Image: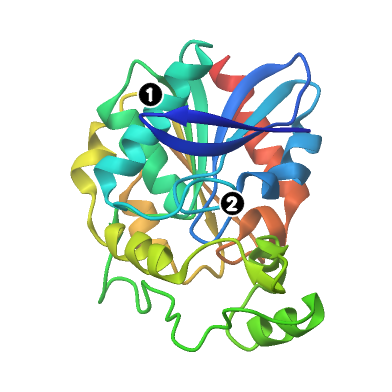
Amino acid sequence: MIESTVDLGGRRFGWVDFGGAGAPILLLHGSFGRGSQFARLAADLAPEYRVLALDQRGHGRSEHGGDFGRAEFVADAAAFLRHLDLGPLPVLGHSLGGLNAYQLAARHPELVRALVVEDFGAVMRAPEIEHPELDLTGWPLLADTEEELRAQIAQRVPVLDYFMASAIQTAQGWRLCFDYADLAATQRGGLGDHWADWLAVTCPALLLRGEHSPMLPAALAKEMVRPGVELVELAGCGHWIHDDDPAAFAEAVRGFLRTVG
């Protein structure tokens, strides 16, 4: 795994190349995530596929601050693909990354050859989604030890390891490697009705839903199916399918990628 940085439009981004000689695929993480979290999937897909993962704005080792709207996230991903200059690639996105991925495919079809969306719908708002935003009130800014930070985060989230993957040690102590104001803006920027973008996607698409997901209702997932879109529901999984059942997740992704060449 090689971690690098790149300047895209005057803004610094971190990214990860998990290596290998396989066919490249771009991965976009969800809110509160980072590219390195796809290490298990990269290992499962190797050597057939070479996973490239971008730390999206405000996340991981990428620059903080600025705007966190739809146009900005999509432009970042498009600029990164043009920087890679590997031709149109399959793009996989989880949660917020799934929204970014299908909006990228809709708005820049020349860059996306195939699409995998992990547990994100064409609508993200109440009442369709009961809790579309994670409340960050009272989250710890700094802790003396990693264990202390872990204990505080555990009181606030359903999947601890996903969030703790963004924990870093600084000279002042342990913290998460994002600013809460950025993540609040990121979540707000993802709210709304995105049907127009979903329906504009022309490449083959795989929509993955966790059986127990609170973020992609079963009825909405079924409504999103149309010619060129395959829906797979993974039993026993919640919103973080790639963590809940990594083997089944990788199998579904690999099987789809093989069908699209």
Query: Can you tell which of label 2 and label 1 is closer to the viewer?
Result: 2
Residue 235 location (% of width, % of height): 65, 61
Q: In terms of secondary structure, where does tag 2 sit? A: loop
The structure residue drawn at horizontal position 63% and vertical position 57%, both measured from the top left corner, is 241
Q: How is the image coloured?
A: rainbow
Residue extending farthest front:
171
Q: What amino acid type should be assigned to the residue bearing mark 1? A: Cys
Residue 63 in sight here: yes
Residues at badges 2 and 1 in contact (C-beta under 8 Å)?
A: no
Count every numbered label the image shows and give the total.
Answer: 2
Looking at the picture, tell me which residue is in the foreground, 3 or 119: 3
Depicted 70 relative to depicted 251: above or below: below
Q: Which quadrant is home to the N terminus?
A: top right
Query: Which picture quadrant has residue 154?
Result: bottom right
Looking at the picture, tell me which residue is in the foreground, 104 or 225: 104
Residue 87 location (% of width, % of height): 48, 10
The structure residue drawn at horizontal position 70% and vertical position 58%, both measured from the top left corner, is 243
Query: Which picture quadrant has residue 133?
Result: bottom left
Q: Can you tell which mark lies on residue 9? A: none
Q: What amino acid type should be assigned to the residue bearing mark 2? A: Gly
Q: In terms of secondary structure, where does tag 1 sit? A: loop
Residue 28 location (% of width, % of height): 52, 42
Query: Which picture quadrant has residue 177?
Result: bottom right
Q: Can you tell which mark lies on residue 203? A: 1
192 lies left or right of 247: left
Residue 33 location (% of width, % of height): 58, 56
Q: Circle 2 sits on which residue? A: 60
Q: Which quadrant is home to the C terminus?
A: top right
Q: Whole-Å distance between the Cαs marked 2 and 1?
A: 29 Å
The structure residue drawn at horizontal position 32% and vertical position 53%, both measured from the top left corner, is 68
Depicted 238 relative to depicted 92: above or below: below
The structure residue drawn at horizontal position 53% and vertical position 62%, both measured from the top left corner, is 178
